[in-house]
Image (cartoon, grey):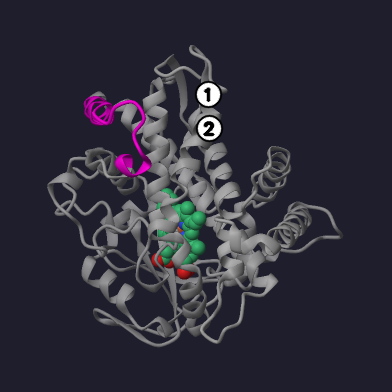
Amino acid sequence: MLARPNQMFRRWRDRYGEPFMVTSPNGQVVEVWEPATVRRVFTADHDDFAVFSPDSIAILIGHRSLLTIAGPTHRRERKLLGPPFHGARMRAYGEAMIELTRARIAELDAGSSFVAMDLTQGISLDVILRTVFGVDDARELDVYRTVVIEAIESAAPVLFFFPALRREFGGVGPYARLVARQRRFVDLLKGQIERVRPQASERADILSMMLEARYEDGEPMSDESLVDELRTLLLAGHETTAITLAWALYLVHRHPAVYHRLREELDGLGESPTPEAIAHLPYLDAVVNESLRLHPVVQEVMRTLTKPFELGAYTLPPGVTIAVNIFLAHRRTELFPEPEEFRPERFLDRTFSPFEYMPFGGGPRRCLGAAFALYEMKLVLATLLGDLELDLASEGPVEPVRRNLTMAPRGGVPLRVVRRRRPA
Ligand code: HEM
């Protein structure tokens, strides 16, 4: 496990160039980031790849999750789960995203300080509980928040990287705690599935759509698959969105020119803009894209070979894993001049191909929730900046640190409420 992967990636890139190989506890990993190679990986036949170390995350999301299945089973599941995350269906959640953000803003007084990550995690958890799991009762939401947070916090990174630690040791220790908390979470989800099932055809949440959906052979999803996919949507969608929002808040407040240009664009929409109007703002879009470029939450996406793969002078054998290194791809100077600078204008000046800029991965496994996440991040950021005037509560630059399977801003970005721009 690399505690400071960014520094190591930079060092190895400078020393070896593409590709370089890392030996991880879960096997050999070959890192690539040149657009031509990335294109070959993302456009290769789906069946050329297996999932990298599925057992390491199966304890959190099961063996019937999009993240742990491959080949035809993955294709079939993707087809079924795709529609709720796109188009009008997904946009129907815009009002809820804004309302849930405002509920959290109401708890912040002028002059108070708070940690951006705590706020954004609260918001993104509420968004998933409401729009994906369909939990709308205030008391139930509280129960969910506790169980979900306990389940997430029990997931220490060492358990993923060192298989030998994944033992219960007589019912004590971090792994035993993780197993117990996951069981509690699964029981809660099973209860929710039973509650939602009878009214699924009249409800708008994603769980209801999953209950109504049918595979091509007319079969519905099994309860086991429903539980695993709900856990996956939470794991993949909660912290990733919260971390990116915390970075965006940090970066916008550290760059006054960006802040003012964004403010101007948001003010131009008037008092109560629609979610659609917010989502179409070009500079807001550029700010979110640039935050994801500079600080991709997921540093690399892995594909384990089931067939030999030609890479320059090498033939990689089955069993080796190819990692598309998003962190290094986003720092190619010919595409992103002065890559360590936060400069949203890059995304107004030109467009990037999916093999040059890929915060959501790519190919048949590209993030299922990418459109949902972008929509949510724009609405939350616009609402926070529209309702509050904020300032950074600590001076120095913030570094990324490992947090579970992702990289997050160290200290979570402390902020101060200068004043409310809109009454609570
Ligand atoms: C800023 C927010 C997010 C980022 C940066 C992000 C990034 C990623 C990345 C890099 C992958 C792996 C893609 C690959 O292997 O090529 C992924 C997969 C996935 N993400 Fe996201 N994600 C975000 C938010 C979400 C949200 C909100 C959801 C759902 C509510 C979600 C659901 C998923 C799922 C289900 C997968 C597995 C897809 C598959 O294997 O077929 N993600 N995400």
- Residue 405 is left or right of residue 298, and the answer is right
Dominant secondary structure of the residues highlighted in magenta in the image: helix
Ligand 1: give its quadrant: bottom left
**Rendered image quadrant of residue 422:** top left
Give the mark, 2 or 1, whose residue is nearer the N terminus.
1
- Residue 351 is left or right of residue 246, and the answer is left
Q: Which residues are magenta?
A: 257-278
Please say if 222 is above or below 267. Answer: below
Disc number for residue 171: none
Disc number for residue 119: 2
> Disc 1 designates what residue?
114
Q: Is residue 222 visible?
A: yes
Q: Residues within 10 Å of mark 2 (few under 14, many from 20)?
A: some
Q: Residues within 10 Å of mark 1 (few under 14, many from 20)?
A: some
Q: Is residue 220 magenta?
A: no
- What x and y, as percent, mark residue 421? 39, 17
| Front residue (pair 413, 72) | 72
- Would the CB of label 1 be found within 8 Å of ligand 1? no
For the view shown, which residue lies furthest in the right direction? 170
Q: Say which amino acid is labelled 2.
A: Leu
| Front residue (pair 325, 245) | 245
Cα distance between the residues tagged 2 and 1: 8 Å
Please say if 187 is above or below 363. Answer: above
Residue at the image point whose x is 44% and y is 36% from the top: 246
Q: Is residue 1 visible?
A: no
| Front residue (pair 307, 181) | 181
Residues tagged 2 and 1 counted as in contact (Cβ below 8 A): yes
Q: Is residue 263 magenta?
A: yes
